[in-house]
């Protein structure tokens, strides 16, 4: 009743939510597009503000060097390079490489911890490098450190093979013969992701040197991260080869070698790759939309061109999921749903009370019937009463049936009955022959023990032994046939077939002995004598089935194999052992058992002897 009424009322509520959602979504998408566009323009301005000065500074160094190249080969150039480096904290180094492989450079001291295998002093603000390479003369490699007040913190000679002419920034400036940008790369000295701005020094139509500056991309990345359009928005700058200049997303650089550029494929997020694959054309600039891989999320993206004082083909890509801006709508829809649900609750309450009075007792009665059918252990919790006469009458009937089954389960092994039901055998007198494994357990010197122990105490201890035996047999999928005083008879392989019934019977026997050893230790610590268990196991073809009368029957096994198993249990007393098994057990599972051959014994009513083995343990699991 509740379900039907809810099914009728909820569509009207859903209609209100859908109409509200669709009418406002269009406005949200439009606002998102405007925000993405504004952010892209802001990024372009920030890039120009950060990078254009570096281009101008390298050009100024190149212009000075074209007029006086020797100035930059002398110590007089240090203040000039240092002044350029102080222009911005993002500028990591300023240097000039010459065609004779010499180089003069200044590094920001806070940007490096080591320099050509030499530790940078903690108070050093600048590291000076002066590598001179002159034909026919010894190399002069000098590195020294100073603070802003020109206080020196040490210097050292460094013999190395550093060659500026072999560096990519020098080669690119030499080839293009104009100001260039190289990178981004992971710098070998600073460890920063950075760009190199370089301008060739051209004298008499020949490139005699290259002036360059390294700029950290940390500031641009911090700007992209700190000014996200929304919580899940992504922004990045890429070049024409899809190499990432800077990004708000994490970049996989662990496997990157020095000077190796970072591509879009190195980003943690796959959204930039999907965005570029969704472009209408390779030269497209502007806004577009695309879907996530699963098609559930819509993204608004914008692509803008970056123009610098040097020729570059950089683009800014910003991506924002529409659901970031739909949060307010979703919250509003939830509010509407809440009001609708509140209105429905008042109407549903009365119907709910009526349906509960009818459905809940029937549901619990159905559960109880299922439990009775499965012969599960039943609790004593009373069944619910009902105001309806028919349900109350049914409750009393099931309660009576439950009590009867509970009493029945206390005297008949539940697992046996459940197994008979699962085997689809008819509950009628009769049986059939089957190859089974039979076990007999008995307590050693029980008669003497019963004479010397209080009856109540002995009953509790025997009950504990029987509980352990039953549990071990059940764990190995055996069937407890009956308790014979202090003895237990069990068998494996019926009513349900077991391929490894012999092995499981042996495993159960060992479990019984192990757990009884633990209990006996506890009893001995209390001054009580131990209960020693003797076990006999035999595998044979026996008769198994329902035996008895039509009024009362028992599911059990009969035959010579049962007698042999019982005789093996008694043989333990004569042989001084705990578990005796027959030759048939050895044939069936001997390769999995640890055994010791004992002797041959005779069984009453049989002419031939039986070869007896002692079971010591298991070789391996089945």
Image (cartoon, helix red, strand yellow):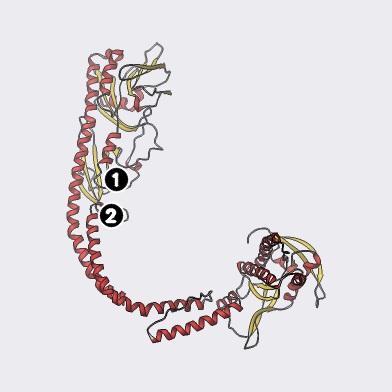
Tell me where residue 52 appears, x and y as whole percent. Answer: 21, 29
Check the image and report above or below for 4 versus 307: below
The answer, for residue 113, to whether it is visible in the render is yes
- Answer left or right for 49 relative to 581: left
Q: Secondary structure at mark 2?
A: loop
Dot 1, how many residues are within 10 Å of its Cα: few (below 14), some (14-19), or many (20+)?
A: many
Check the image and report above or below for 354 versus 187: below
Residue that lies at the very extreme toward the top in this rendered image: 137
Quick one: 152 or 476, which is closer to the camera?
152
Quick one: 477 or 267, which is closer to the camera?
477
Tell me where residue 95 appears, x and y as whole percent. Answer: 30, 21
- Answer left or right for 605 relative to 359: right
Residue plotted at (22% across, 48% down): 280
Quick one: 603 or 213, which is closer to the camera?
603
Tell me where residue 228 appears, x and y as whole percent. Answer: 25, 44
From the image, tell me which residue sits under label 2: 297
Q: Secondary structure at mark 1?
A: helix
Q: Quadrant of residue 242?
A: top left
CA–CA distance in space, label 2 to label 1: 14 Å
Check the image and report above or below for 469 versus 382: above
Q: Which part of the image, by quadrant, shows the N terminus? A: bottom left
Residue mark closest to the camera, 2 vs 1:
2
- In terms of sequence position, does the residue under pointer 2 or pointer 1 come before the other? 1
Dot 2, how many residues are within 10 Å of its Cα: few (below 14), some (14-19), or many (20+)?
A: few
Residue plotted at (40% across, 11% down): 137
Q: Which part of the image, by quadrant, shows the C terminus? A: bottom right
Check the image and report above or below for 100 versus 14: above
Q: Quadrant of residue 455?
A: bottom right
- Answer left or right for 249 relative to 471: left
From the image, tell me which residue sits under label 1: 272
Tell me where residue 407 appears, x and y as whole percent. Answer: 57, 80
Residue that lies at the very extreme toward the bottom in this rendered image: 550
């Amino acid at each position: 009743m509740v379900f039907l009424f809810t099914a009728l009322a909820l569509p009207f509520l859903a209609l209100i939510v859908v109409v509200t959602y669709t009418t406002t979504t269009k406005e949200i998408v439009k606002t998102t597009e405007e925000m993405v566009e504004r952010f892209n323009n802001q990024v372009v301005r920030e890039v120009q503000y950060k990078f254009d000065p570096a281009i101008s500074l390298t050009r100024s160094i190149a212009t000075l060097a074209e007029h006086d190249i020797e100035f930059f080969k002398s110590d007089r150039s240090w203040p000039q390079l240092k002044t350029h480096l102080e222009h911005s904290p993002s500028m990591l180094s300023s240097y000039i490489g010459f065609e004779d492989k010499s180089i003069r450079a200044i590094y920001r001291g806070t940007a490096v911890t080591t320099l050509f295998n030499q530790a940078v002093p903690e108070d050093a603000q600048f590291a000076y490098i002066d590598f001179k390479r002159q034909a026919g003369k010894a190399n002069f490699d000098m590195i020294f450190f100073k603070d802003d007040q020109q206080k020196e913190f040490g210097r050292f000679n460094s013999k190395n093979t550093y060659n500026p002419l072999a560096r990519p920034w020098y080669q690119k400036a030499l080839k293009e013969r104009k100001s260039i940008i190289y990178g981004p790369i992971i710098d070998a000295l600073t460890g920063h992701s950075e760009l190199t701005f370089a301008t060739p020094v051209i004298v008499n139509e020949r490139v005699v040197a290259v002036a360059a500056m390294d700029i950290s991309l940390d500031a641009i990345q911090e700007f992209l991260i700190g000014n996200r359009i929304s919580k899940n928005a992504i922004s990045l700058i890429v070049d024409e080869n899809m190499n990432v200049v800077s990004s708000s997303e994490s970049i996989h650089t662990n496997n990157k070698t020095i000077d190796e550029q970072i591509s879009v494929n190195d980003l943690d997020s796959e959204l930039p790759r999907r965005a570029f694959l969704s472009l209408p054309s390779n030269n497209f600039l502007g806004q577009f939309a695309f879907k996530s891989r699963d098609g559930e999320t819509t993204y608004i993206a914008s692509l803008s061109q970056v123009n610098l004082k040097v020729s570059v083909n950089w683009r800014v890509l910003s991506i924002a999921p529409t659901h970031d801006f739909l949060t307010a709508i979703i919250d509003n829809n939830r509010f509407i749903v809440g009001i609708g649900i509140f209105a429905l609750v008042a109407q549903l309450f009365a119907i709910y009370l009526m349906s509960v009075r009818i459905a809940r007792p029937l549901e619990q009665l159905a559960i109880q019937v299922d439990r009775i059918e499965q012969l599960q252990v039943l609790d004593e919790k009373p069944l619910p009463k009902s105001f309806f006469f028919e349900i109350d009458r049914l409750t009393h009937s099931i309660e009576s049936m439950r009590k009867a089954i509970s009493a029945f389960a206390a005297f008949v092994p539940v697992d046996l009955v459940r197994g008979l039901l699962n085997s689809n055998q008819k509950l009628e007198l009769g049986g059939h022959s089957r190859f089974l494994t039979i076990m007999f357990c008995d307590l050693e010197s029980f008669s003497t023990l019963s004479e010397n122990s209080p009856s109540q105490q002995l009953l509790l201890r025997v009950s504990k032994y029987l509980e352990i035996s039953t549990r071990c047999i059940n764990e190995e999928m055996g069937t407890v046939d009956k308790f014979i005083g202090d003895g237990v008879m069990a068998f494996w392989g019926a009513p349900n077939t077991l391929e490894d019934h012999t092995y499981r019977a042996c495993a159960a026997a060992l479990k019984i002995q192990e757990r009884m050893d633990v209990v006996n230790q506890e009893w001995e610590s209390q001054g009580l004598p131990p209960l020693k268990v003797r076990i006999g196991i035999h595998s044979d073809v026996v008769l198994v089935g329902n035996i008895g009368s039509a009024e009362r029957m028992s599911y059990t096994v009969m035959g010579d194999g049962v007698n042999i198993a019982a005789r093996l249990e008694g043989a333990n007393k004569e042989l001084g052992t705990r578990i005796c098994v027959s030759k048939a057990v050895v044939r069936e599972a001997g390769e999995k058992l640890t055994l010791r051959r004992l002797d041959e014994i005779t069984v009453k009513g049989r002419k031939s002897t039986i070869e007896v083995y002692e079971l010591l343990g298991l070789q391996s699991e089945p």
